[in-house]
Image: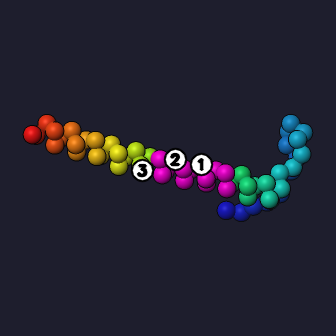
Amino acid sequence: MQLQRIGPRPDGLGTVGVEDQIKLIGLQLHFVIVVAITVSIAGVRNRRVIHQCAADISE
């Protein structure tokens, strides 16, 4: 990923520097990682529930 200084925005709020881009990328990655962990935990819990239900039914 290549970082570069972005020129003035159309809304007149100025420029976004390299440091700000790094922070934004970090926030995006943090969100993706949290979602991935949450989904994997939910998947494990759902599998346990499904296996327990199957065990209860077969008894």
Question: Disc number at residue 35?
Answer: 2
* Residue drawn 10% across the image and 40% down it: 58
Residue 29, magenta (yes or no): yes
Total count of labels? 3
Which numbered circle lies on residue 40? 3
Q: Which residues are magenta?
A: 26-38
29 above or below 55? below
- Three-letter code for the amino acid on which mark 2 is drawn: Val
CA gap, disc 3 to disc 1? 14 Å
Q: Are marks 2 and 1 in contact (CB under 8 Å)?
A: yes
- Element under disc 2: helix
Dot 3 amino acid type = Ser
Q: CA distance from mark 2 to mark 3?
A: 9 Å
Q: Residue at x 40, y 44 (%)?
A: 42
Q: Are marks 3 and 1 in contact (CB under 8 Å)?
A: no
In contact (CB < 8 Å): disc 2 and disc 3:
no
Q: Is residue 8 left or right of residue 20?
A: right
Please indicate whether residue 20 sits to the left or right of residue 34 in the image: right
Q: CA distance from mark 2 to mark 1?
A: 6 Å
Judged from the image, the secondary structure of the residue bearing numbered disc 3 is helix
Q: What residue would you read off at disc 1?
A: 31
Say the numbered circle drawn on residue 2.
none
> Is residue 54 found left or right of 25 in the rendered image?
left
Dominant secondary structure, magenta: helix
| Crowd band around label 3 with a 10 angstrom C-alpha radius: few (<14), some (14–19), many (20+) | few
Q: Residues within 10 Å of mark 1 (few under 14, many from 20)?
A: few
* Kind of residue at badge 1: Phe
Judge the density around disc 2: few (<14), some (14-19), many (≥20) Cα neighbours within 10 Å.
few
